[in-house]
Structures are given as C-alpha cells and as structure tokens.
Image (cartoon, helix red, strand yellow):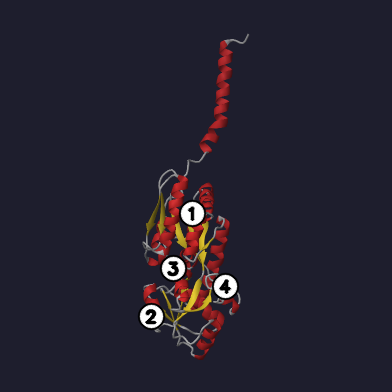
C-alpha cells in the first residue's frame, strides 16, 4: 500500500504539471470584445452622409455586440482632425474610424505634415458602401455628353469652368485626371460648400462639376442639370441613359467609398470580428435598402482586399496630384 507522503508528493507534482500546461492557455485567451463602449469617429459634420451612414451601422453593431457604439462627428481640415484622432487612439478596437477614400488615398500626397502616417496608421476592416460620381453640367452648357464636353473644351481651352470643394477634393483630382486623360484644359474654381457650387452651376456661372451619386441622381432625374457621364466602370442603374466615362476615355474610373478602419496594430482577431459583423449587417435587407436609397452600392471586402484597394488608389492619385501640381489651400 502506498503511504500518505508518497500520495501527497504525486498529487503535488500533478498539480504543478497541470498548472504549467493550462496556465499559458488561460492567459492567452483574449478579453471579450467589446469590453466597453466603442467610439466611432466620423471626419465630417453632423447630418452629413458619412455621419448618417455611420449611425446606421453603429445602431446594428451595438445591438449585435451588446455594447454602445457611439458616433462622434469630427469635421475639419479635410478630414485630417478625425483621422488623426483615431490614429493616436489605443489599438484595442474601442476607437474606430468611419472613413472615406480621401483620408488615406489623397491626403497623404497633398500634405507634407500629417498627424498620421498615411494609410500605414490604420488597420483596414472592411468597405461598407461604394458609389461613383456623376459629371453634371449646367442647363446652359452646349454639350449634352462627355464627348461633346471634350470637343467643346478643345475649341475653348481654359474657358470652361469646373467647380469643386477645394484643392485635393475628389472633385478636383477627378477632373484633373480627366484633363490629363483627354488632353483638355478646364478652369478650376473651388467652393466652400457643395450647395454654393450647385447654385452657380444652375445659374450658368459654372459649367460642370463631379457630384456624388446620392446628390447628383435627383438633380439629373428632375432635369435641373445635364448628366454628362458617370465615373463607375459601367452605367448606373439609377441613370441608365448616362454613359460611363470609360465609354469615351478608356479605363477611366473613380469610386467613392466609405468603410471602417481601426488604429494600426489593432489585434487581428478584433479586426476579423468587426469584419464579420459588418459583413453580416451589410447583407441585412433593410440595410441594403437604406444604402440603395442613398444611391450607394452596398459592398464589403476582407481587410486584405481593402488594403490592396487603398494601395492601388493611392498610387493613382499620387501620379495625378504630382503631374497637376495640386497644392492644399
């Protein structure tokens, strides 16, 4: 019969062995996410399209993950203030950026000193919405389509005016891309607000501008402006009679997108969890209906796909900005 001291020694050895084996596994388990309310920074003003869409996703994320997702609009400086705040935040998934393409594909090539290291400051999560732009023309414009505009611009170099929301905006770099691709000269006039530029377009003081789909489609359908071309690869279902740029200028495509990014070095398991939840939300019929109602294409990507898209677009805009000599105002 085994004596008691021997049994104690064996039990002690077994407990030490189990502790050594199970201890690291227990410590390796990540804390439940989210462990507290999550802040979603939107580098745009309250009531803007990004703010409205961010709140739609925040509501569903909060319901699914059982923590509040709080949207914080942070407009200013071409989105730099909001993007910089997220880049500096703790990389624990409790601060997210509801961003758009200009922040990581255009701004890094415009500003010498950013408070964040371009796209490297963020961990892409997923796109949630994608749309194009419509080149709209004044009712007084002689041209009715893109070939007509190009021909008119060649007859009147430097006399046709295009509006934008300032140097480095998508409307600015997009029109500079057209000028380079088509070999035409247009005069750029920046505006502080989209409403002011639209008013001048309707009054004939501005000839053309690139307008986001959500606001352009109602204007074209109402006959208030001319729809000259769309920047998507193919014609839009919302404007089937308006040709795509690529039908006249090969390979010309500009997409505007919204998506979620986290601070760089956010744990991959948190990024993946957010990706899965957001993809499920975008697939919900009511969410799809809301997005389509804004004239936006519901879309999702993997984090790797989003990173590659950012890299590709960033390279394109770097070339355009360098060649056109665009400087921030």
Label 3 element class: loop
Per the image, the residue denoted by label 3 is 112
Per the image, the residue denoted by label 4 is 235
Q: Where is residue 10 drawn, in percent x and y?
A: 59, 18
Task: Report if the CB atoms under discs 1 and 3 are less than 8 Å apart.
Answer: no
The crowding category of the residue bearing disc 2, from other C-alpha atoms within 10 Å (few below 14, some 14 to 19, many at least 20), is: some
The crowding category of the residue bearing disc 3, from other C-alpha atoms within 10 Å (few below 14, some 14 to 19, many at least 20), is: few
Number of numbered labels in the structure image: 4
Q: CA distance from mark 1 to mark 2?
A: 42 Å
Q: CA distance from mark 1 to mark 3?
A: 21 Å
Label 1 element class: loop
Per the image, the residue denoted by label 2 is 200
The crowding category of the residue bearing disc 1, from other C-alpha atoms within 10 Å (few below 14, some 14 to 19, many at least 20), is: some
Q: Which mark is residue 264?
A: 1
Between tags 1 and 3, which lies in front? 1
Label 4 element class: loop
Is residue 153 visible in the rendered structure shown here? yes
Task: Report if the CB atoms under discs 1 and 2 are less than 8 Å apart.
Answer: no
Quadrant where the C terminus lies?
A: bottom left
The crowding category of the residue bearing disc 4, from other C-alpha atoms within 10 Å (few below 14, some 14 to 19, many at least 20), is: some
* Mark 4 or mark 2, earlier in chain: 2
Q: Hey, which residue is sitting farthest bottom in the picture?
A: 155
| In this view, 39 is above or below 105 | above
5 or 283, which is in the foreground?
283
214 or 182, which is in the foreground?
214
Between tags 1 and 2, which lies in front? 2
Q: Residue at image x 54%, y 28%?
A: 19
């Amino acid at each position: 019969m085994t004596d008691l001291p021997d049994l104690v020694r064996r039990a002690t050895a077994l407990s030490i062995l189990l502790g050594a084996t199970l201890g690291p596994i227990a410590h390796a388990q990540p804390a439940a996410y989210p462990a507290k309310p999550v802040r979603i920074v939107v580098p745009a003003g309250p009531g803007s399209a990004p703010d409205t869409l961010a709140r739609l996703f925040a509501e569903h994320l909060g319901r699914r993950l059982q923590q509040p997702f709080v949207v914080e609009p942070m407009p200013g400086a071409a989105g730099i203030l909001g993007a910089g705040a997220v880049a500096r935040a703790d990389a624990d998934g409790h601060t997210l950026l509801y961003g758009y393409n200009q922040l990581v594909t255009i701004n890094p090539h415009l500003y010498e000193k950013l408070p964040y290291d371009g796209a490297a400051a963020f961990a892409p999560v997923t796109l949630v919405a994608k749309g194009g732009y419509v080149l709209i023309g004044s009712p007084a414009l002689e041209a009715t389509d893109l070939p007509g505009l190009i021909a008119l611009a060649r007859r009147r170099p430097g006399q046709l005016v295009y509006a934008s929301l300032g140097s480095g905006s998508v409307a600015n770099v997009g029109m500079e891309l057209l000028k380079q691709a088509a070999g035409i000269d247009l005069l750029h006039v920046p505006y502080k607000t989209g409403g002011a530029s639209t008013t001048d377009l309707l009054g004939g003081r501005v000839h053309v501008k690139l307008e986001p789909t959500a606001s352009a489609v109602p204007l074209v359908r109402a006959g208030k402006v001319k729809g000259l071309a769309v920047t998507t690869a193919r014609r839009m279902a919302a404007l089937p009679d308006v040709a795509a740029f690529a039908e006249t200028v090969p390979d010309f495509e500009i997409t505007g997108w919204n998506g979620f990014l986290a601070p760089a070095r956010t744990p991959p398991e948190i990024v993946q969890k957010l990706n899965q939840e957001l993809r499920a939300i975008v697939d919900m019929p009511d969410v799809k209906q809301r997005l389509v109602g804004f004239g936006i294409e519901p879309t999702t990507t993997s984090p790797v796909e989003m990173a590659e898209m950012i890299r590709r677009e960033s390279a394109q805009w770097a070339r355009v900005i360098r060649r056109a000599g665009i400087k921030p105002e």
